[in-house]
Image: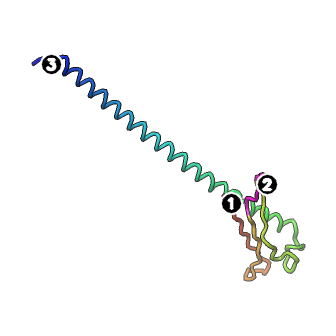
Amino acid sequence: MRRGRGERGMVMTVAILAVTMIALLAAYVLTVAYNHRRLAQSVGGVRMRAAMYAQAGVVDAQWRLRTDPGGTFAAGGTAYDPPAYSLDVNGDGTNDVSVDISAVTDGPDGNTRRIVATGTQ
C-alpha cells in the first residue's frame, strides 16, 4: 500500500505540533522552577539577615556588659535592668535590631543577665 503525499504531510505536521507542545511544556516547568527557587532564596535571605542582625545585637549587649564590670550594668548599678535599645547594624539610618538586657534574679550567682535580641526583616 502506498501512501499519498497528503498523508505524509499530515504525519509531519502532527509530529511538529507534538514536539512544539512538549517544548512549551518544558519551558513552562523550567520557568516555574526558576521562579520558585528565586522566591525561596529571597525568603531565606530575609530570615538569614534578621538572624544576623539579632546575633549582632547579642554581641553588642555582651560587649556592653563586658566593658563595664562593676559599673552601670553591675548588680545594683543604675542600669542593672536597663531599658531596651535599638541598633542600626547596616548604617542605613533605620534600626535593624532591638536588644533587651534584663536581670535574672533566679540565676546561680544573682548577677546573671538575659539578653534578647530581635532582628527586623
Of circles 1 and 2, which is in front?
Answer: 2
Task: Give the left or right position of residue 25, taking residue 82 as reference.
Answer: left
Using the image, tell me which numbered label, if any, was put on residue 93: 2
Kind of residue at badge 3: Arg
Residue furthest out toward the right: 71
Q: Which residues are magenta?
A: 90-97
Question: In this figure, which residue is indicated by the disc labeled 3?
Answer: 3
> Could you say whether the residue bearing mark 2 is in a helix, strand or loop?
loop
Residue in view at x 75 percent, y 62 percent: 57
Label 2 Cα neighbours within 10 Å, binned few <14 / some 14-19 / many ≥20: few
Occupied quadrant, residue 103: bottom right
Percent position of residue 109, x then y: 78, 80
Kind of residue at badge 2: Gly
The span from disc 2 to disc 3 (Cα, nearest Å) is 78 Å
Using the image, tell me which numbered label, if any, was put on residue 120: 1
Occupied quadrant, residue 101: bottom right
First of labels 1, 3 by sequence position = 3
Quarter the N terminus occupies: top left
